[in-house]
């Protein structure tokens, strides 16, 4: 505990708090001072909470702090039963409650600042379901959720950029490198301009080059527009395919449906919707109203301590005991008569609960069916984009799968049969070859014997006669079988026709009655539909008028708000100008010379005098320069002539020196020749 208090004191003595506490002064703080200190720490985390607790009620202070601690995900020490003690300690400023909170907040101040900043934009406002039935409220709530998601994405990108390693030094180096490149490019452009200036018609060539660049940019923009239009055309074709698919499915549904099934489906929907409107939704609305009423009542009551809660629990137990006694007395008094009613009541309550459960299941099933239908439409569109053929669904798909399975089994079976037949075919082929060889040998032997006996060709004639007789017997047998089959088929058809007539007779009678009933129901349905259309048209006209009125009022409200803001801004600017004028007047009229020097008029007059003095000095300097310009120019000309004269003397001296050296060389050469 001492380490915790020491840590809190060290953090409070640092920036940005600078409280100058020690352990004794911090421990001697009163409850109000501790609460104010906690409020200051919370105000450092979230500036909205930087308030003076003396200006608000203790319950409001505790509620405000609890809301922020809940947003910051602070978990009080202890179990759930200790929450009331924590709330009470937060209201009274208890040290065992405040010290852990301060220690937790000061440990992670930067992290909590970030969380509080994000909570301003990411804590979602819960809108009741009955308000979301309004289209305007629903649209605004949807826009609110979209903006929240956009803020999340932007914050993630910002954090990634912060942690991506880009420092200011690197950015400055990049900027300096880019400036150097810019200078090089400017110099290069200047060099190119100088080169181009010598070329004939360079202005026209530059204009043509500029036009060429513009046309290239235009070509790129047109290509981009073309690509965008292609994408739009592709999306439009996809939407058209989806719409055609939906239309085709609706046509199939209308073709396959019957009046009886449609009427039955409509009756089920009407019953379900009437149950929702008359029983379920009013009951839920009443329960929500009761719960909100009780919650408002609880919120309006002052904060309760543990003793108050104990008293309420005792009262609740007493009331429950009295209720049990009264129920026992009533059961003892009215048991023989009321037993049946209690049984019926139980059955009715069970049935109502089952009905509610089934209604909820039906609602969930409808929602699931709608979602699966949407997924099915997406999948069908994707499949059409990939395959380009119609996608099977429902029973057709099941039938197709079963057909594929049967074909697969049939294929495997036939494949095995083909393998057996090929194996048997190989054996039979080999057997046939052997038998042919034996037959040829036997035929050769038989022909040799017939040649010996003098009856050649006898065996061939005998085989032909046997073959013809066998064919004739087969044809006779086939004719007999076909006649028997035809007679049996005729008998079966006659019996089947008689059975069908006998079975269809009652069905035809029922069909006539049902047709008459269907006509009556269709007539009644048409009348109800006409009534519904007239009522819907009236409600739609009323709704359109109300929407127009609301739109006009909203526009008027927006206009008034903009006028109000504009007037406020003008008022603030005028107030600022008036305040500046008052300050200027006060400084100008003030007897204090220091204050008078601060006035803008004095400053401007002083600056004007300084500029005038500077102008006088510059004019005097200009006059001196003009007067001394002629003599100075003459002196410069004399100095230039003097330099030229000295340069000529130097050159003459150098030439004379060179000539003397050449004469000495010539004289020395002549002396050498004389010596030789």
Image: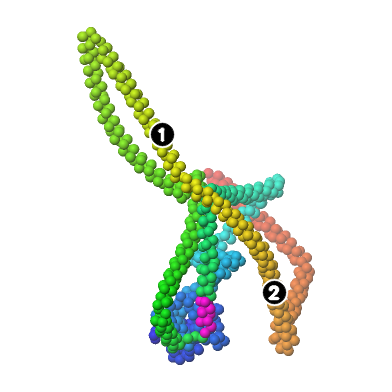
Q: Is residue 524 above or below residue 405?
A: below
Span colored in magenta:
290-301
Q: Is residue 151 visible?
A: no
The image quadrant that residue 200 belongs to is: top right
Residue occupied by mark 1: 490
Q: Nearer the viewer, residue 406 or 101?
A: 406
Alpha-carbon span between mark 1 and mark 2: 99 Å
The image quadrant that residue 582 belongs to is: bottom right
Residue 633 coordinates in the image, percent (x, y): 75, 64
The quarter of the picture where the N terminus appears is bottom left
* Element under disc 1: helix
Mark nearer the N terminus (1 vs 2): 1
Q: Nearer the viewer, residue 380 or 231?
A: 380
Residue at x-position 39% and y-position 81%: 332
* Element under disc 2: helix
Residue 252 coordinates in the image, percent (x, y): 53, 48
Q: Determine the main secondary structure of the stretch shown in magenta.
A: helix
Q: Is residue 267 visible?
A: yes
**Number of residue marks:** 2
**Residue 459 located left or right of residue 572:** left
Magenta region includes residue 114: no
Residue occupied by mark 2: 564
């Amino acid at each position: 505990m001492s380490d915790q208090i020491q840590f809190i004191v060290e953090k409070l003595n640092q920036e940005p708090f600078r409280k100058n506490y020690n352990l004794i002064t911090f421990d001697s703080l009163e409850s109000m001072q501790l609460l104010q200190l906690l409020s200051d720490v919370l105000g450092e985390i979230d500036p909205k909470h930087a308030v003076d607790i003396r200006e608000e009620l203790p319950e409001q202070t505790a509620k405000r702090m609890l809301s922020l601690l809940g947003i910051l995900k602070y978990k009080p020490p202890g179990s759930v039963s200790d929450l009331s003690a924590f709330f009470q300690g937060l209201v009274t400023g208890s040290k065992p409650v405040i010290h852990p909170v301060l220690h937790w907040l000061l440990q992670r101040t930067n992290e909590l600042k970030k969380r509080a900043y994000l909570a301003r934009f990411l804590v979602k406002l819960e809108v009741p379901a009955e308000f979301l039935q309004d289209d305007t409220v629903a649209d605004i709530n949807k826009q609110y959720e979209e903006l929240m998601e956009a803020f999340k994405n932007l914050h993630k990108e910002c954090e990634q950029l912060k942690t991506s390693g880009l420092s200011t030094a690197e950015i400055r180096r990049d900027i300096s490198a880019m400036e150097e490149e810019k200078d090089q490019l400017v110099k290069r452009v200047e060099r190119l301009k100088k080169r181009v200036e010598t070329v004939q018609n360079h202005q026209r060539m530059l204009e043509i080059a500029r036009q060429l660049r513009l046309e290239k940019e235009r070509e790129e923009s047109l290509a981009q527009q073309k690509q965008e239009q292609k994408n739009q055309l592709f999306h439009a074709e996809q939407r058209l395919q989806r719409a055609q698919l939906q239309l085709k499915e609706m046509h199939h549904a209308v073709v396959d449906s019957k009046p009886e099934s449609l009427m039955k489906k409509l009756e089920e929907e009407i019953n379900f919707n009437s149950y929702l409107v008359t029983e379920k939704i009013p009951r839920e609305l009443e329960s929500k109203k009761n719960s909100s009423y009780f919650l408002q009542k609880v919120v309006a009551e002052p904060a309760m301590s543990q003793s108050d809660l104990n008293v309420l629990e005792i009262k609740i137990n007493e009331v429950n005991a009295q209720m049990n006694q009264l129920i026992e007395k009533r059961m003892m008094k009215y048991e023989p008569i009321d037993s049946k009613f209690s049984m019926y009541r139980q059955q009715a309550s069970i049935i109502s609960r089952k009905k509610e459960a089934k209604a909820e299941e039906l609602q969930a099933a409808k929602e699931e069916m709608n979602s699966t239908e949407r997924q099915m439409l997406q999948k069908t569109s994707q499949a059409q984009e990939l395959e380009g053929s119609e996608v099977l669904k429902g029973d057709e798909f099941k039938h197709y799968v079963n057909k594929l399975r049967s074909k697969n089994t049939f294929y495997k079976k036939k494949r095995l049969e083909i393998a057996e037949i090929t194996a048997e075919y190989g054996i039979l082929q080999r057997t046939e070859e052997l038998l042919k060889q034996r037959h040829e040998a036997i035929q050769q032997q038989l022909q040799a014997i017939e040649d010996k006996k003098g009856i050649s060709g006898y065996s061939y004639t005998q085989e032909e006669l046997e073959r013809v007789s066998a064919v004739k017997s087969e044809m006779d047998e086939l004719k007999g079988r076909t006649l028997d089959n035809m007679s049996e088929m005729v008998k079966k058809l006659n019996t089947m026709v008689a059975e069908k007539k006998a079975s269809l007779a009652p069905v035809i009678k029922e069909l006539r009655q049902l047709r008459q009933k269907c006509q009556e129901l269709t007539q009644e349905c048409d009348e109800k539909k006409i009534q519904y259309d007239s009522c819907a048209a009236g409600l739609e006209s009323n709704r359109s008028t109300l929407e127009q009125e609301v739109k006009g009022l909203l526009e008027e409200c927006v206009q008034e708000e903009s006028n109000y803001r504009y007037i406020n801004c003008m008022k603030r600017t005028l107030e600022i100008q008036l305040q500046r004028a008052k300050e200027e007047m006060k400084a100008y009229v003030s007897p204090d010379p220091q204050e008078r020097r601060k006035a803008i008029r004095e400053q401007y007059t002083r600056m004007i005098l300084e500029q005038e003095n500077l102008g006088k000095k510059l004019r005097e300097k200009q006059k001196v320069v003009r007067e001394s310009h002629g003599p100075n120019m003459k002196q410069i000309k004399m100095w230039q002539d003097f330099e030229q004269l000295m340069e000529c003397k130097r050159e003459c001296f150098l030439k004379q020196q060179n000539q003397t050296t050449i004469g000495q060389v010539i004289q020395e050469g002549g002396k050498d020749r004389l010596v030789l």
